[in-house]
Image (cartoon, rainbow, N blue to C red):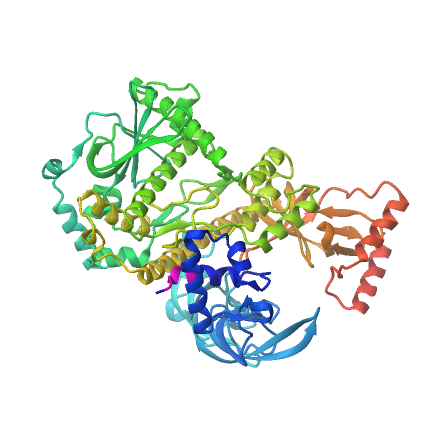
């Protein structure tokens, strides 16, 4: 039977944007299918053709089927009234455009049925558009926003990008809501082209802007988990009550006599990984990575396991954690607290001086953390500021640095990629108000833990692969050809080169060449966007960025469900089972595919919620900084303006063309630039600009900027004429105004000059 995971891998490749139909053999080469995988690849292609998910076109080219007359998919709305349907069953056309007036009241996230019709050919390719015939299932019926009142009518302006019209409220007093309150609204009547949205307030979260209200809003907006049910809490209490470290000592290797430390953020409460390191007489190092043995407390099929599986991961919001496991476990007996006996699963890896792996072993163990360090403390020790820290902890940490640098150098030699994406941390006062943002700590102590966790994850996946145990891998595919071509085009704008057929080492050189330059952020961001998203799947696809053939997540079972499933498989290996006994009762590949999709989706939801809350908190801070001047880098050019990433706050704002100096701005796609039609002034991706914060729109998550510095014109009139002429070729008008409106605006601007 062909592999479902392999089939999904093929589908994902052929439905990628820009895929060009090619013969089966060419497709195999493009996907870098090895000889050992050819049989599975061929069988998966045949199964996909038989089910109609792919077809063979002219010249035996593999392609997706043409869109049928009606499709079912997920709707994504645009504030300007139109939208797109993302088909459930991928087709050769991709997302279906739905014009304004033909959306039938569909909202972002709704499952819809849409009629498809041809609009004619463009560039030799058939163009389609759709009309939503029926909303089959609403994606959401609850929305969060601020309550307002105008002209005697009550309404809520929803936050985010799901619904773009106000929701009218008949009786806000039922919940005691007042203007300016942040509320949760349940829709009674969905908006259409002819009628308003109407709803009822079901919850008042608090005054908009008060500390903690933004976090509650994001939790409601994303449907994040709430409190644990009583049966789950009781199962956790029962698991804790059964914990007897003395009884466990008879079945485990006791590591109580060796120095073991944890390094975590200052505000962390769940410590699921600890490190030991000893040097052998022959000069080799034995690294011990000790991970909380959550599998000993969370048994399959229990309410505790069911809840952890449903949540899939812990969610870390600023000043708030939504845990995967009840805190009696996550912050209690599973957390590797200082001097407390804790059950662990340990990976022991022996390295030579150059960081090469010599041998690996695994064991169920008991550890007692010698010292709990924060990253800041570890960085201070490595910088020679040990203070009154014990000598054995200081020695251990410095040895860890030595080995981590050797491992990092080896992994770079193997092609590992490391992106330099700066982050900020949000600073709150004692009242919970956001008062500042500061650069996140980037000391080498973070890299030490990262390198050791990567090595342990890789070692466990290698073992499970050797034992032929199907497991949830952490896979990261190579960039698609189309994504790579887009990256090359972007780099040409910056006068940088990435050769055709470039590999990881070429990307390494590229990143190194821009390090510390004004182009660094834009280039690192572009490389990141060209990559596929890492996800959980049983397919042995490898991890591109880590240059790893076999990789899984093992080191964070307190906060990630895939790690817990891997721990259970490792238990099978440590139990001495062999042959059919070791695989009896494990999940099927189909079950692993489904679980991987569930965990990947929940992970993305958590990341999106964290990202949006950070954005909201920074925007709320910037409401108090309107008029402040900032330095930023141009990250993109759109038909409405220029996107600028602010250095100080690491947030993107829009510099609208209609706020720029008097000129007509044309977009020059081939050079990633906006060019003044009259003056020849240019704004290019990667440019640094001095801007001012002009407006903050919290509901729509938008930051408006004004240009402060004077844009320098080209050096000569000839250059200006050439620039203006070049900008007109193959470009489109930056302004969306009509020709008449443009003429009027031009007259007004000329008078101002």
Q: Is residue 367 magenta?
A: no
User: Is 489 drawn above or below residue 402 in the view shown?
Assistant: below
The residue positioned 77% from the left and 55% from the top of the image is 665
Residue 526 percent coordinates (x, y):
59, 47
Q: Nearer the viewer, residue 423 or 56?
A: 56
- Is 607 placed left or right of 638 in the picture? left
Residue placed most toward the observer, 705 or 312: 312
Taking 63 as reference, is 590 left or right? left
Q: Is residue 598 visible?
A: yes
Horizontal and vertical percent for residue 168? 50, 73
657 with respect to 520 (left or right): right
Q: Is residue 3 magenta?
A: yes
- Quick check: 194 above or below 185? below
* Magenta span: chief secondary structure: helix
Toward the viewer: 551 or 730?
A: 551
Q: Quadrant of residue 495?
A: top right
Which quadrant, please, contains the N terminus? Answer: bottom left
Which residue appears farthest toward the right when viewing the image?
718
Up/down of 348 relative to 79, above or below:
above
Q: Is residue 205 visible?
A: no
Magenta residues? 2-7
Q: Where residue 257 sits in the image (x, y, percent)?
A: 19, 25
């Amino acid at each position: 039977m062909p592999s479902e995971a392999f089939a999904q891998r093929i589908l994902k490749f052929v439905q990628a944007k820009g895929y060009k139909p090619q013969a089966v053999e060419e497709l195999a080469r493009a996907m870098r299918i090895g000889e050992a995988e050819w049989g599975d690849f061929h069988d998966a292609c045949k199964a996909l053709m038989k089910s109609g998910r792919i077809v063979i076109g002219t010249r035996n080219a593999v392609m997706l089927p043409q869109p049928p007359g009606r499709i079912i998919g997920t709707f994504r709305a645009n504030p300007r009234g139109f939208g797109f349907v993302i088909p459930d069953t991928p087709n050769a056309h991709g997302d279906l455009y739905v014009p304004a007036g033909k959306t039938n009241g569909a909202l972002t996230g709704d499952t819809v049925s849409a009629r498809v019709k041809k609009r004619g050919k463009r560039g030799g390719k058939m163009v389609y558009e759709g009309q939503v015939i029926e909303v089959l299932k609403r994606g959401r019926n609850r929305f969060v926003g601020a309550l307002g009142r105008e002209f005697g009518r009550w309404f809520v302006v929803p936050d985010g990008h799901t619904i773009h019209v106000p929701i009218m409220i008949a009786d806000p007093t039922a919940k005691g809501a007042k203007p300016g309150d942040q509320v949760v609204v349940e829709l009674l009547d969905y908006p259409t082209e002819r009628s308003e949205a109407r709803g009822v307030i079901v919850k008042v979260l608090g005054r908009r802007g008060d500390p903690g209200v933004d976090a509650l809003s994001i939790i409601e907006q994303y449907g994040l988990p709430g409190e644990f049910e009583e049966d789950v809490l009781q199962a956790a209490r029962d698991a804790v009550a059964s914990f007897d470290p003395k009884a466990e000592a008879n079945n485990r290797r006791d590591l109580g006599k060796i120095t073991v430390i944890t390094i975590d953020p200052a505000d962390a409460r769940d410590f699921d990984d600890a490190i030991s390191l000893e040097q052998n007489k022959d000069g080799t190092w034995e690294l011990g990575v000790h991970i909380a043995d959550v599998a000993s407390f969370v048994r399959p099929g229990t309410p505790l396991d069911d809840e952890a599986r449903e949540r899939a991961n812990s969610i870390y919001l600023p000043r708030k954690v939504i845990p995967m496991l009840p805190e009696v476990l996550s912050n209690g007996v599973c957390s590797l607290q200082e001097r407390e006996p804790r059950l662990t699963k340990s990976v022991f890896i022996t390295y030579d001086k150059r960081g090469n792996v010599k041998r690996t072993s695994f064991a169920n163990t008991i550890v007692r953390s010698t010292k709990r360090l924060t990253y800041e403390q570890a960085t201070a020790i490595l910088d020679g500021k040990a203070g009154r820290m014990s000598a054995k902890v200081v020695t251990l940490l410095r040895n860890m640095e030595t080995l981590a640098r050797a491992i990092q150098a080896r992994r770079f030699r193997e092609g590992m990629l490391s992106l330099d994406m700066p982050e900020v941390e949000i600073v709150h006062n004692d009242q919970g108000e956001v008062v500042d943002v500061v650069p996140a700590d980037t000391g080498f102590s973070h890299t030490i833990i990262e390198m050791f966790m990567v090595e342990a994850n890789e070692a466990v996946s290698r073992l499970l692969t050797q034992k032929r145990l199907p497991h949830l891998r952490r896979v990261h595919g190579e960039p698609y050809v189309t994504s790579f071509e887009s990256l090359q085009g972007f780099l040409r704008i910056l006068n940088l080169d990435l050769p055709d057929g470039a590999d990881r080492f070429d990307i390494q050189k590229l990143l190194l060449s821009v390090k510390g330059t004004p182009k660094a952020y834009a280039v690192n961001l572009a490389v990141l966007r060209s990559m596929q998203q890492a996800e959980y799947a049983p397919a042995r696809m490898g991890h591109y960025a880590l240059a790893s053939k076999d990789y899984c997540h093992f080191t964070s079972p307190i906060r990630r469900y895939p790690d817990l499933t891997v721990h259970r498989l490792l238990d099978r290996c440590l139990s001495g089972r062999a042959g059919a006994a070791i695989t009896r009762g494990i999940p099927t590949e189909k079950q692993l595919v489904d679980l991987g999709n569930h965990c990947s989706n929940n992970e993305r939801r958590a990341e999106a919620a964290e990202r949006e809350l950070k954005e909201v908190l920074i925007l709320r801070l910037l409401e108090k900084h309107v008029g402040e001047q900032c330095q930023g880098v141009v990250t993109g050019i759109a038909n409405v303006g220029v996107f600028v990433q602010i250095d100080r706050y690491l947030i993107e704002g829009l510099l609208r063309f209609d706020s720029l100096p008097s000129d007509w701005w044309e977009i020059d796609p081939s050079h990633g630039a906006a060019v003044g039609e009259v003056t020849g002034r240019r704004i290019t991706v990667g440019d640094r600009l001095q801007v001012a914060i002009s407006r903050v729109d919290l509901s729509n998550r938008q930051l408006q900027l004004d240009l402060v510095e004077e844009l320098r014109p080209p050096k000569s009139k000839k250059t200006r004429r050439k620039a203006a002429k070049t900008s007109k070729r193959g470009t489109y008008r930056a302004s969306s105004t009509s020709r008449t409106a443009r003429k009027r605006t031009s007259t007004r601007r000329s008078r101002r000059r």
